[in-house]
Image (spheres, rainbow, N blue to C red):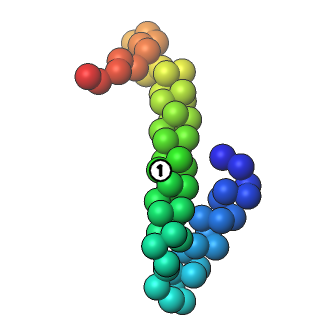
Amino acid sequence: MENSKLNRINELAKLARERELTPEELRERDVLRKEYIAEWRRGAEQVLENTYIVTPDGKKQKLRKRS
């Protein structure tokens, strides 16, 4: 995620602590949060796709995706 978007999320969070956000700001915050979470999930999935479990006998097993 771009730094400018992360900065905007933080800016809106700070504003929310100081005052009530306008409806436009609430919508913007929701869109940015959803985008951030989606990007975080993609990154976490990539890490897990390249993760292996090493059993006590030394065998490597790739993690299986839950359905």
Residue 54 visible in image: no
Q: Residue furthest right?
A: 3
Instruction: Residue 39 in the image: state x and y as whole percent.
Output: 55, 41
| Quarter-of-image position of residue 53 | top left
The spot of residue 22 in percent (x, y) is: 49, 78
Q: How many marks?
A: 1
Q: Residue at x 58, y 79 (%)?
A: 14
Residue wearing tag 1: 34
Image spot of residue 31 (x, y percent): 50, 54
Identify which amino acid the numbered label 1 is placed on.
Lys
Indicate the quadrant containing the C terminus: top left, top right, bottom left or bottom right.
top left
Instruction: Give the camera-side residue of 14 and 48.
Output: 14
Who's the residue at 46% across and 85% down the image?
Answer: 20
Q: Nearer the viewer, residue 26 or 48?
A: 26
Point 69% across, 64% down: residue: 7
Q: Residue at x 35, y 18 (%)?
A: 64
Quarter of the image for residue 47 reads top right
Above or below for 28 versus 39: below
**Residue 61 placement (x, y as % from top left):** 42, 13
Q: Nearer the viewer, residue 51 or 23?
A: 23
The reply, left or right, for residue 6 in relation to residue 36 is right
Q: Secondary structure at mark 1?
A: helix
Q: Nearer the viewer, residue 59 or 26?
A: 26
Q: Is residue 26 visible?
A: yes
